[in-house]
Amino acid sequence: MTALAGRHTADAELVDRLRRDPESFTEVYDRYFADVHRYVAGRLDTDAADDVAAETFLVAFRKRARFDPARGALRAWLFGIATRLVAQHRRVEARHYRTLARATAHPSEGSHENRVVTAVTAAGLQPALAAAIAGLTRKERDVLLLVALGDLSHDEVAQALRIPYGTVGSRLNRARGKLRSALAKEIPAHG
């Protein structure tokens, strides 16, 4: 049995307990909060991540009866909820990327994304990277950041976003291609 299949089975048992005993939801929170928070912090900022991650688990608790283990893993379901909540904050997210693109100073160390961008800044590519990410469609950005920040597999991304597995690959390839193209224009100027 793979680790993913084992976790899926454990999730199904946990959800079954949740339906009988809502107080057991703390296990879901304990098991997945850090992963969801890290993903959201990379999409938004640390302060927004606190709120959105908490809201993710509130929504999950309210909709726990709707979770169907046959449709996918609990982790992917939670990331799907988080992604939809991030989409509600996408104007803030887009402003965040535009600000990073214009920034001349090092970005805040608050989020994982900003730490990654700070490392890229050493090569002078931070504004171009932020602009390239901001230039992606929301759907491409969701897939890219679920993989990069959420560390989800293609199958988990498909479950989280309720899209076909093949669509995950095509969106991810398009996003990576756009990022490569945007950054290739900058590399000669900084290399």
Image (spheres, rainbow, N blue to C red):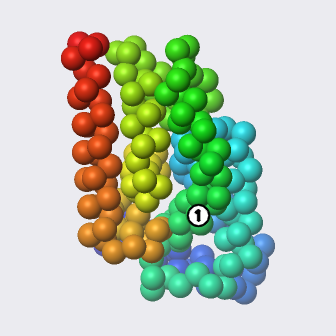
Q: Amino acid at mark 1?
A: Arg
Residue at x 53% of width, y 85% of height: 68
Question: 164 or 38: which is nearer to us?
Answer: 164
The image quadrant of residue 47 is top right
Residue at (69% x, 53% y) in the render: 52
Can residue 112 be seen from the camera position used here? no
Q: Residue furthest right?
A: 23
Q: Position of residue 61 (x, y in %)?
A: 72, 72
As drawn, is 68 to the left or to the right of 146?
A: right
Quadrant that contains the C terminus: top left
Q: Quadrant of residue 92?
A: top right
Name the residue rendered at 71%, 69% in the picture: 59
What x and y, as percent, mark residue 65? Answer: 66, 85
Between 99 and 9, the residue placed more toward the observer is 99
107 or 186: nearer the viewer: 186
Figure quadrant of the N terminus: bottom left
Question: What residue is shown at x 64% (from left), y 65% (from top)?
Answer: 28
Q: Which residue is mark 1?
A: 84
Residue 141 on image: x %, y %: 43, 51
How far across and down, in percent of the image, does residue 160 sit?
47, 68
Q: Is residue 176 above or below residue 139?
A: above
Q: Is residue 102 above or below residue 69?
A: above
Q: How crowded is the residue under tag 1: few (<14 C-alpha within 10 Å), some, or many (20+)?
A: some
Q: Is residue 167 among the parts visible in the rendering?
A: yes
